[in-house]
Image (spheres, rainbow, N blue to C red):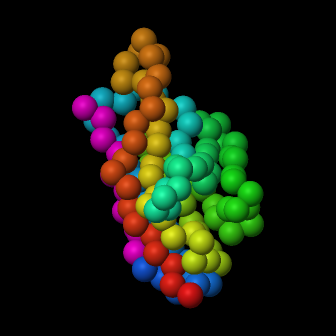
Amino acid sequence: QVQLVESGGGVVQAGGSLRLSCAASGFIFKINTMAWYRQAPGEQRELVAAIASGGSTNYADSAKGRFTISRHNAKVYLQMDSLKPEDTAVYYCNADLSETAALKFKGYWGQGTQVTVSS
């Protein structure tokens, strides 16, 4: 069974940095895109950043210039710098992967990690 486990959340002052990590484990044949989403209270879940298997990246406008997504094997990272109070949210890892050589891809989610930025 595939699992995605996030770590690295916490409380930080505005202007500070955090690095989120997510590790995928289990029966994994191939991973396409890995991404970070976030959901603030009362808001919809939104894409923060994504990285394809070839390394191309995509960022939300709010993350450009401050966040950097990277990946290595079955792990994905999100380096967050110059954090703002509006970055406060639960951050979720997502991976589009196939468990077998049949290449039937499906999206998997982690349990989420809380990021709180104080002003």
Q: Quadrant of residue 102?
A: top left
- Is residue 114 highlighted in magenta? no
Q: Position of residue 83 (x, y in %)?
A: 60, 76
At horizontal 62% and vertical 84% (from top left) the residue drawn is 15
Work out which quarter of the rendered image holds the C terminus and state it.
bottom right
- Most extreme residue toward the top, as rendered? 102
Total marks in image: 0
The residues colored magenta run 1-10
| Side of 59 where 1 appears, left or right | left
Name the chief secondary structure element in magenta. strand
Q: Nearer the viewer, residue 65 or 114?
A: 114
| Side of 95 where 111 appears, left or right | left
Q: Position of residue 100 (x, y in %)?
A: 37, 19
| In the depicted structure, whether residue 23 falls above or below residue 62 | above
Q: Nearer the viewer, residue 71 or 87?
A: 87
At horizontal 36% and vertical 24% (from top left) the residue drawn is 99
Q: Position of residue 64 (x, y in %)?
A: 73, 61
At horizontal 74% and vertical 66% (from top left) the residue drawn is 65
Asked if residue 54 shows in the view, the reply is: yes
Q: Quadrant of residue 1?
A: top left
